[in-house]
Amino acid sequence: MDRRDFLKIMAASLTLPTLLPAEAGQGTGRWLNLIRPQSGEKLSIIYKRNGQVDMQAYRKVCGLMRDVKADQASVIDLRLLDILDGIRAALVQAGVPNPTFMVHSAFRTWQTNREIGGALRSYHMKGQAIDFHVPGVPTDILFTWMQKVKFHQGVGMGFYGGTPNWMHLDSRQVGRTVIWEG
């Protein structure tokens, strides 16, 4: 799918009922396709069924989203995973088959965060942030679309163009929203 076709589909989807994170996957399950380029790990998993967390699946997600450099896992915020599932469901609704999140960074130890120049109070260190892109989906279009359909309520959302072309998403206190480009 080229950029122009994708833009048309996403624009048309603004008129469809929006699957916000709180509504996505109700009654069935919440699932994610994740790839961690640094380690080569791949995971396609249902982490929640009928509102109940599958702890074995959740631990696998936390393992994949670990600090790869320090090889240390942490608890990943379920709200962040639910937001990702909402994005996945909306992309499917917009015609993107089997969306996969390429996870560039998720949990970070304070040492790794300091070494890469991360923010002093980075949500990555709390297991509440992910830097990612979705192959085949222009990140700038996804970022703009997420702002328009209000995926940004109670999150931090940043778009980083260039190479690599990825975005940051974190789960903040509901009602507190920060959006940036840079």
Image: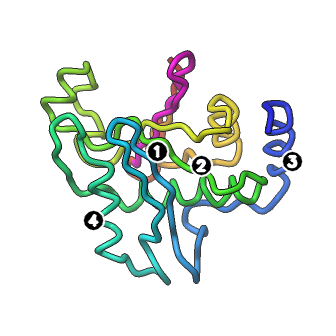
The structure residue drawn at horizontal position 33% and vertical position 57%, both measured from the top left corner, is: 77
Q: Is disc 2 placed on a helix, strand or loop?
A: loop
Q: CA distance from mark 3 to mark 2?
A: 17 Å
The structure residue drawn at horizontal position 67% and vertical position 32%, both measured from the top left corner, is: 138
Instruction: Tell me which label, 1 or 3, sits earlier in the chain.
Output: 3
Three-letter code for the amino acid on which mark 3 is drawn: Ala
The structure residue drawn at horizontal position 42% and vertical position 53%, both measured from the top left corner, is: 42
- Dividing the picture into quarters, in which one does residue 111 lie? top left
What residue is disc 2 on?
A: 151
Instruction: Tell me which label, 4 or 1, sits earlier in the chain.
Output: 4
Question: Can you give x and y, in whole percent of width and height, for residue 133 in the image?
Answer: 54, 37
Three-letter code for the amino acid on which mark 2 is drawn: Phe
The structure residue drawn at horizontal position 85% and vertical position 37%, both measured from the top left corner, is: 5
What residue is disc 4 on?
A: 59
Q: CA distance from mark 2 to mark 1?
A: 8 Å
Q: Which residues are magenta?
A: 158-171
Crowding around mark 1 (Cα neighbors within 10 Å: few <14, some 14 to 19, many 20+) is many
Q: CA distance from mark 4 to mark 1?
A: 23 Å
Q: Is residue 30 left or right of residue 42?
A: right
Instruction: Tell me which label, 3 or 2, sits earlier in the chain.
Output: 3
Q: Is residue 111 left or right of residue 24?
A: left
What residue is disc 3 on?
A: 12
- Dividing the picture into quarters, in which one does residue 88 lie? bottom right
Q: Are marks 2 and 1 in contact (CB under 8 Å)?
A: yes
Q: CA distance from mark 2 to mark 4?
A: 25 Å
Q: Is residue 166 magenta?
A: yes
Image quadrant where one finds the N terminus: top right
Query: Which SS type dominates the magenta stretch?
Result: strand
Instruction: Tell me which label, 3 or 4, sits earlier in the chain.
Output: 3
Q: Are marks 3 and 2 in contact (CB under 8 Å)?
A: no
